Image: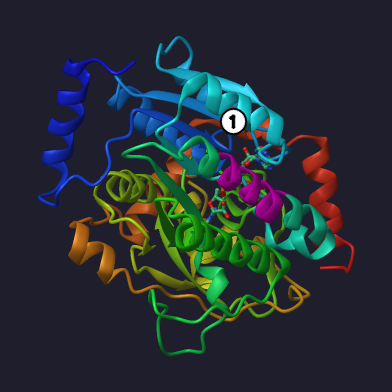
Amino acid sequence: MLTSASRIAFRQTSRIMNSSALQHEPKRILVTGGAGFIGSNFLLHMVPKYPGVQFVNLDLLTYAGNLLNLQRLEGSGNYHFVEGDIADGDLVRSLFEEHDFTTVVHFAAESHVDRSISDPLAFVRTNMVGTATLLETARHAWKNSQDVRFHHISTDEVFGSLGSEGVFTEETPYDPKSPYAASKAGSDHLVRAYGHTYGLPYTLSNTSNNYGPFQHPEKLIPLVILRCLKEESIPMYGDGMNVRDWLHVHDHCSALECILKYGRDSQTYLVSAEQESTNLNLVQTLTDLIDDITGRPQGRSRELITFVEDRPGHDFRYAIDAQHLRNELGWKPQYDLPAGLLHTVRWYIEHPEWLEAIADESYQQYFEKQYLSSGP
Ligand SMILES: NC(=O)c1ccc[n+]([C@@H]2O[C@H](COP(=O)([O-])OP(=O)(O)OC[C@H]3O[C@@H](n4cnc5c(N)ncnc54)[C@H](O)[C@@H]3O)[C@@H](O)[C@H]2O)c1
């Protein structure tokens, strides 16, 4: 139970953060997918900061889940891990009964576009059936509850692809292109439908590409760092001119903290640091940083970049206008792209044991199948 002293502490921290009125006061939070990249960064940020709030992390520990990320939380009295599937209705119901959650922060998903192209049904199952199972359980459990909230974490990929001009806003129509994006779009619609039909209190965020500590090296930035450090070829899809809008994961976590407390019911917030880069420019920046830090001759690591056949249906550009979040809730990011990339490269260089543990044999097989089967 939350003590009145810790409730006061929660409110005080809230006031420091911005001047908006508190909309929701989380007391017992179910975090799904908390062993993944963003979920583990969120727990590392929140658990020590809110000792009076209980956190239960429900994670299936797929290839993307890694308890090594959460070692710093071992021994925390307000944190509890449960291995299990969000699509397992009996398990989710028993957790609601046991912990009487006030809040769900829903990260769990199949999250890699390439994998969604080879195995789309796994994405439909976790991202849609899993989300529906959580929503259905929450609506029954919260029938007579006050001050409860379901926060759903989603992606800007639900909006499809931009040309060289324009940005996504909260008003942009949905136009998902990959099975991953379509399954996330389906989950967003389910969340809004539960809000509209059953009055389930919710907030939703769509976020641009994240980067930072603890990201699985199937994703671009850790993949480049890992392969560059080992002086192995770095695959670049197509001509490298696709544009992404990059957000440091610590900034994403502070935005989520802000939305959870100050976000208005039934609102959607787009989250981004508005830092666009072509993939080629991003990868060259990373290889140059690694040359600097490791003392290699400047430009040497760029020679590792190898152009490979483009991803089917590869979206050209994503870019988010985050003014709604900035203006309404007063959130702002701490990292621009150069500072965030420097922090990230240093983190991976300083944590070789984490990279070694994750880049195991199954990862190598995945890498070879994904990038080398069609020849570099
Ligand atoms: N990474 C990004 O750049 C990005 C950008 C925008 C939105 N998102 C969204 O943020 C969320 C988190 O992304 P991430 O990059 O941390 O993903 P991730 O792949 O690193 O982690 C996903 C986590 O979910 C767990 N999981 C998968 N299926 C599960 C199931 N059926 N039941 C319980 N747990 C399950 C995995 O074990 C893993 O720990 C996702 O919903 C994703 O769509 C990610």
Residue nearer the viewer, 320 or 226: 320
Q: Is residue 164 above or below residue 272?
A: below
Viewport quadrant of the C terminus? bottom right
Quarter of image, res 144 = top left
Highlighted range, magenta: 126-137
Q: What percent of the width, then of the height, locates residue 166?
A: 40, 87
Q: Which residue is mark 1?
A: 58
Q: Is mark 1 within 8 Å of ligand 1?
A: yes
State the predominant SS element of the stretch in magenta.
Answer: helix
x 37%, y 68%: residue: 275
Judge the density around disc 1: few (<14), some (14-19), many (≥20) Cα neighbours within 10 Å: many
Question: Horizontally, is 46 left or right of 290 in the view?
Answer: left
Disc 1 secondary structure class: strand
Q: Is residue 66 visible?
A: no
Residue nearer the viewer, 244 or 351: 244
Display coloring: rainbow
Tell whether position 130 is magenta. yes
Q: What percent of the width, then of the height, locates residue 16?
A: 11, 39
Quarter of image, res 83 = top right
The total of numbered circles placed on residues is 1
Q: Is residue 153 above or below residue 253?
A: below
Q: What percent of the width, then of the height, locates residue 270?
A: 38, 65
Quarter of image, res 331 = bottom left
Disc 1 residue type?
Leu
x 51%, y 25%: residue: 70
Q: What percent of the width, then of the height, locates residue 323?
A: 26, 70
x 61%, y 62%: residue: 184
Q: Is residue 258 above or below residue 348?
A: below
